[in-house]
Image: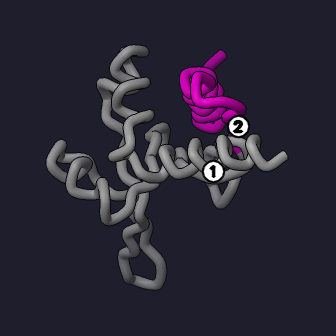
Amino acid sequence: MAISIEQREREYVAHIVDLLQFFGSVESKSMFGGFDVFLEGLMFGLVADNELYLKVDAKNRQDYEDLGLQAFSFGRNGKEFKMSYYQAPLEAMEDAAHRHSALAKPSNSCLWSISLHLALRKLVV
């Protein structure tokens, strides 16, 4: 029996969520034909067509572009829209040590900001 595309993508998302547990409570939610990825309830990534995209901003966008990684985009009404989510570096998904160093460093500003926010939230509580 063949695995459906939807089932294959759900398995991929479960794998991604498992790989990123070193950050904390990572989970996914099905949204708009893909999946959003959250850390402690704060969105930092999305999965579309079995590809993980991470939130970027002006501080780290160039790092992703220098690696040749593409922004997530979609078409609507004949127009293409690019979002501020870029493909995750393949090395970070294949190697645990590289994943931690690549994704947890301050230049990955979205994840760094979420981690800082969570740490501060724990101090206040």
Q: Is residue 18 left or right of residue 109?
A: right
Residue depicted at x 39% and y 56%: 56
Q: Which corner quadrant of the image does residue 4 belong to?
A: top right
**Three-letter amino acid code of the residue under disc 1:** His
Q: Residues within 10 Å of mark 1 (few under 14, many from 20)?
A: few
Residue 93 colored in magenta in the image: no
Mark linked to residue 27:
2
Q: Is residue 114 visible?
A: yes
Residue 10 colored in magenta in the image: yes
Query: Which one is earlier in the sequence, the residue at label 1 or at label 2?
Result: 2
The image position of residue 6, as x and y in percent, is: 64, 38
Residue depicted at x 33% and y 58%: 71
Q: Is residue 54 left or right of residue 17?
A: left
Q: Is residue 3 visible?
A: no
For the residues carrying marks 1 and 2, which lies nearer the camera in this image? 1
The image position of residue 124, as x and y in percent, is: 78, 49
Q: Residues within 10 Å of mark 2 (few under 14, many from 20)?
A: many
Using the image, determine if residue 62 lies above or below residue 25: below
Q: Is residue 69 left or right of residue 29?
A: left
Using the image, determine if residue 16 lies above or below residue 64: above
Q: Nearer the viewer, residue 16 or 100?
A: 100
Query: Mark 2: which secondary structure?
Result: strand
- Give the residue at the far right of this rendering: 125
Residue, disc 1: 117
Residue depicted at x 57% and y 46%: 116
Which stretch did the figure color magenta? 1-28
Cα distance in 3D space between marks 1 and 2: 17 Å
The image position of residue 119, as x and y in percent, is: 65, 41
Q: Is residue 39 left or right of residue 53?
A: right
Q: Which corner quadrant of the image does residue 81 belong to?
A: bottom left
